[in-house]
Image (spheres, rainbow, N blue to C red):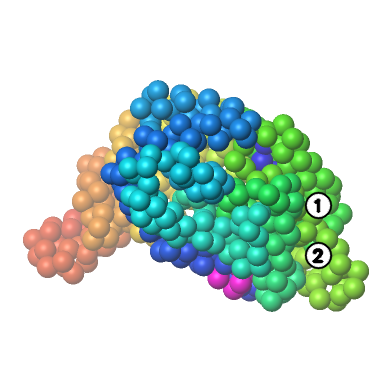
């Protein structure tokens, strides 16, 4: 289940400079610094494989896991070995620092004497390669925790989706928080909350050598700050629960217990997960506490004008979104019903007429001809509108009788441009051949003559000029 606050819209009047810097740094670190990690892993695995250390280390690793009582992991590794996925097991073996220390302490006991010198020469080099991998060098390791890694782990990510997910939530919530509390405080609160999130994760097992990386703890804090800034004001939330998607409004802080509770429940029910649930929970608590302290002691530092500004979706856009939602789900009748209500309330526009035309085109009920006429009759000379009207006219020869002569002439006059000249001429000739001539048709002929004159089409200029004169001379205008 996903619930995220969406009360505020992005506003360049309150440019999120720190937010953009954080996103840029995370992206830069991942695609530049961390890009070398794969090469380092490959070098370490190739060297380990070439020396064939796995032959005598795997039995030792199995024995070590049995001593630790980690039978589930051992079972998974046995299955991988049987499936021929030795490389997967090797990388886990090589990254287990406690195992390496155990092996080093008992090397004369476990390593064949004939291979011992070779092992002492190459194994430290392999470990040095792995130690230079970003997560090992700057990730947060509970039993080696320090201030540098408490900050640096926040800018490392496991893969592209990990990065994109964190940056998405950070951007969605961060710009509003930065606008509300200011640039410098946003940066300090973000980093401090990340530290608290890291300590919360490590506190579950300070002896652990597992690495924590990612900005999710800091991002959780930003989400909590968002709720704290609005407190009990009803704000908009987006939700996604299985197939149910939509928006609702609720007092902001009422959602915070849900956020924290969800992480705690998952921590206790999904023990084997790689997700750092306690880091998330710690981040939520840190963000909420920081905003609470700000409200208690420095209330004037909050940008109340920005917080109270109503940025709810325009009612017109909200109604239009419902039409598109039905349209995208092929519920054409419901979409048409909402669209008719929208037009009745706000009036017709070219985009609404086009939408109604496309809806009726999908089903071709009785109103299609009327929608066709409505669309091509709308006045306007924008390039987009004329292009669409021309295509609609050409695509629907069977419905052209829904337009009277004046409407046909008006359409032809609008299309009498260089880009749509051919269609304009077709319209003119269809009217002229019907003998339903009028003063407006004479003006239409004159416009075509002028246009061909500009294009240096002398023969056609003379042709339409003659027709224009002929209409008047024949006395066929009444």
Q: Quadrant of residue 259?
A: top right
Q: Image height check: is 302 above or below 334?
A: below
SS under mark 1: helix
Q: Image height check: is 346 above or below 84?
A: below
In this view, the mark in front (1 or 2): 2
In the image, farthest residue toward the right:
296
Q: Nearer the viewer, residue 390 or 138?
A: 138
List x then y, in percent, for residue 430.
Answer: 25, 42
Q: Image height check: is 444 above or below 57?
A: below
Can I make out residue 227 in this image? no
The answer to whether 130 appears left or right of 50 in the picture is: right
Residue 385 image label: none
Q: Nearer the viewer, residue 343 or 399?
A: 343
Mark 2 burial class by Cα count in 10 Å: few <14, some 14-19, many 20+: some
How many numbered discs?
A: 2
**Which residue, given by chain and number where applicable, does mark 2 sit on?**
290
Can I make out residue 99 in this image? yes
SS under mark 2: helix
List x then y, in percent, for residue 280.
Answer: 70, 50
The answer to whether 438 appears left or right of 295 in the picture is: left
Residue span colored magenta: 16-21
List x then y, in percent, for residue 387.
Answer: 33, 52
**Which residue, given by chain and number where applicable, does mark 1 sit on?**
252
Q: Nearer the viewer, residue 201 or 2?
A: 201
Q: CA–CA distance between discs 1 and 2?
A: 16 Å
Residue at 79% x, 54% y is 285
Q: Image height check: is 273 above or below 230?
A: above
List x then y, in percent, for residue 474.
Answer: 22, 53
Residue at 33% x, 35% y is 396
The image quadrant where one finds the N terminus is top right
Q: Considering only order in the chain, which callout, 2 or 1, is on the residue closer to the N terminus?
A: 1
């Amino acid at each position: 289940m996903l619930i995220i606050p969406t009360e505020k819209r992005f506003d360049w009047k309150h440019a999120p400079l720190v937010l953009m810097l954080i996103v840029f740094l995370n992206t830069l670190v991942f695609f530049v610094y961390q890009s070398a990690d794969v090469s380092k892993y490959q070098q370490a695995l190739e060297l380990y494989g070439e020396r064939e250390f796995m032959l005598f280390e795997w039995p030792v690793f199995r024995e070590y896991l049995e001593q630790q009582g980690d039978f589930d992991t051992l079972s998974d590794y046995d299955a991988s070995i049987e499936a021929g996925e030795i490389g997967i097991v090797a990388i886990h073996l090589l990254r287990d620092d406690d195992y390496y220390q155990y092996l080093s302490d008992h090397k004369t006991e476990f390593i064949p004497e004939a291979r011992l010198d070779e092992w002492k020469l190459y194994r430290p080099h392999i470990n040095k390669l792995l130690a230079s991998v970003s997560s090992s060098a700057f990730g947060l390791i509970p039993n080696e925790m320090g201030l540098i890694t408490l900050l640096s782990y926040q800018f490392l990510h496991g893969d592209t989706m990990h990065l994109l997910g964190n940056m998405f939530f950070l951007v969605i919530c961060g710009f509003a928080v930065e606008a509300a509390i200011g640039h410098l405080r946003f940066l300090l609160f973000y980093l401090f909350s990340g530290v608290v999130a890291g300590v919360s994760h490590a506190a579950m097992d300070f002896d652990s050598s597992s690495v924590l990386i990612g900005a999710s703890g800091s991002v959780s804090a930003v989400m909590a700050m968002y709720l704290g800034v609005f407190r009990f004001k009803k704000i908009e939330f987006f939700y996604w629960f299985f197939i149910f998607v939509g928006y609702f409004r609720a007092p902001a802080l009422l959602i915070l217990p849900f956020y924290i509770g969800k992480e705690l429940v998952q921590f206790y029910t999904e023990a084997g997960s790689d997700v750092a649930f306690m880091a998330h929970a710690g981040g939520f608590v840190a963000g909420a506490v920081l905003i609470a302290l700000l409200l208690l002691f420095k209330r004037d530092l909050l940008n109340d004008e920005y917080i109270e500004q109503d940025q709810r979706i325009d009612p017109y856009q909200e109604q239009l979104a419902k039409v598109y939602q039905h349209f995208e789900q092929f519920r054409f009748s419901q979409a048409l019903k909402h669209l008719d209500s929208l037009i009745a309330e706000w009036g017709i526009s070219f985009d609404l007429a086009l939408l109604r035309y496309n809806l009726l085109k999908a089903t071709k009920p009785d109103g299609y001809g009327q929608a066709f006429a409505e669309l091509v009759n709308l006045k306007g000379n924008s390039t987009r509108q004329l292009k669409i009207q021309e295509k609609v006219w050409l695509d629907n020869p069977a419905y052209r009788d829904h337009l009277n002569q004046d409407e046909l002439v008006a359409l032809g006059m609008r299309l009498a441009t260089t880009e749509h000249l051919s269609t304009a001429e077709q319209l003119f000739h269809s009217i002229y051949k019907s003998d339903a001539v009028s003063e407006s048709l004479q003006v239409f002929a004159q416009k075509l003559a002028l246009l061909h004159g500009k294009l240096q089409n002398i023969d056609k200029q003379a042709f339409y000029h003659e027709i224009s004169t002929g209409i008047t001379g024949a006395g066929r205008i009444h």
